[in-house]
Amino acid sequence: MSAPMVTAENVHKSFGHVEVLKGIDLEVRTGQVFCVLGPSGSGKSTLLRCINHLERIDAGRLSVDGQLVGYRERSGKLYELNENEVADQRRDIGMVFQRFNLFAHMTALQNVMLAPMDVRRLPKAEVREHAMQLLGRVGLADQAQKYPSQLSGGQQQRVAIARALAMKPKLMLFDEPTSALDPELVGEVLDVMRDLAASGMTMIVVTHEIAFAREVGDHLVFMDSGVVVEQGAPRDVLSNPQHKRTQTFLSKVL
Amino acid sequence: MSGLPAPTDAKTPIRAIPVRHWGQQVSGVIVLAALVAFIYAVATNENLDWSIIAANLFGPTILSGLWVTISLTVLSLIIGAALGVTVAVMRLSPNRVLNSVAGGYIWAFRGTPVLVQLLLWFNLALFFPRLGLGEFSLDTNTVITAFVAALLGLGLNEGAYMAEIVRGGILSVDHGQSEAAMALGMRRRSTMFKIVLPQAMRVIIPPMGNELITMLKMTSLVTVIAAPDLLNRAQVISSRNFYIFELLIVASIWYLALTTISTLIQMRLEKRFARGVAGVAPRRRRILLNLKPGRVTSPVITPGDRPVVYAKGGAGS
């Protein structure tokens, strides 16, 4: 068994009076492709956003690579990290959004180059070379000078993946990366993710792509109403769901 | 030629008698007649001495006032824009002190008439006779000249309005943009200056044209503190020769000329920024280049774009 990359213990999160996460316990191991499945509103996106502290958890413990997310523990006391320390924690965690969120005023290449230069302060020539490599890896070397609005959804999402990879993250978070795409564009994004999984990247993937979870996933979690209903090897959970809610959900999407 | 026209005839232009707009034609004649009557009345009015207007329109006193008006407008706008960006960013900061200071500034400077603010600055010596500490202090009246008071009054007032324009621009940028930057580990400052503000410019720039026009006219208020602007110079001349109406017309002609040029600038800006988000960056660069003084045309012109003159209108003298 490899070392744990993400550990969640009894994680709670509420928005106002609505409790979105009601005590989540999880362990994501290094190199694992960890898929999260569930109906909308089940809290799966919120969980993902808590992992890089885009949302703050209300109770429980959440750590990435042995470090508490958003807090520092010293002699039994928790100290909240300041804004810049939180930013520093996020450097090593890549995130891919449902709506791509590419910087609209920058070319594909500039999108990929920005963070390594701004955050890691690496020299421009080196960053550019690495960025071109990454764009090549996602099959978009010839689109480097295009603006996001000139690219298809699938191409935009592939640039977004390259942008996240440019920071050389140890963990990648995917928040429904194919949900905003036309059906014929889903495949090209999943291909890139498959390739990334094969390279040994630790990935947490919130998705509705059952086939991807079955084929690429190492572990699958089914969430509903803020709790983990069941989890296990994707093949087992998908073909032989134990819980009633999982069965109902799968019968609707399969 | 028989029966229904074949579908291939669709290219033949339709020949029909157009709708007659009788109301428009009749009212047009009435308005035109009224205009002619007005021009005749003005041109033949013995109480108006046209030679005075002609003599003063390009006279050195008026031109010096024109220069003061233009420099006051441009400098106040620059102060206003710089303050506006700073205050807008402060207003949106989670830091409660910065947030409250910005809110208080906007509240005070938007909540009092600019005329009152001008008088307050001009009379600052009544409140603080000396500025500075101990030995390093100066007589307030030597520091706050009429021009400086005018600049402070107009610039600080403009800053409050500009802050709201900039804040609106910042809020118009999709939250996903700053979230993506945060997820990459970028700090708040970088995110604001490299991601959010450049995209907010699309929304911020067009109303700035409007502010330019407003500011041009607002500078005439500085007459009350005897700053030597266009209106003030016109009044100085008329206090000597008593041709009050003629000199007000001279000032009006210049204000109209300046606002016309500003309107043209504003129309260009709005046209450019009304287009889709596509290629925002090169366009932004073009506009920034065009805003440089003396810059005549844009370096990157896509087919269909016409060269635009920006800077000459606002800064010409």
Image (spheres, coloured by chain):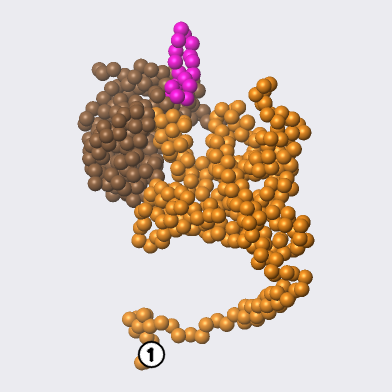
Chain colours: A brown, B orange
Give the extent of the magenta segment.
A70-86
Question: Residue at position x 63%, y 56% from top?
Answer: B60
Relative to the observer, which residue lies in front, B233 or B128?
B233
Question: Residue at position x 41%, y 56% from top?
Answer: B297
**Amino acid carrying mark 1 in the image:** Gly
Q: Determine if the magenta segment contains residue B1.
A: no
Relative to the observer, which residue lies in front, A145 or B209?
B209
Asked which quadrant contains residue A67, the reply is top left
In the picture of the structure, the residue carrying the numbered disc 1 is B3
Asked which quadrant contains residue B96, the reply is top right
As drawn, is B205 to the left or to the right of B45?
Answer: left
Question: Residue at position x 36%, y 57% from top?
Answer: B301
Question: Residue at position x 48%, y 44% from top?
Answer: B200
Q: Position of residue A3 (x, y in %)?
A: 28, 17
Relative to the observer, which residue lies in front, B251 or A105?
B251
As drawn, is B118 to the left or to the right of B185?
Answer: right
Task: Answer above or below: position of A230 versus B68.
Answer: above
Q: Determine if the magenta segment contains residue A84.
A: yes
Q: Position of residue B259 (x, y in %)?
A: 60, 58
State which chain disc 1 sits on.
B
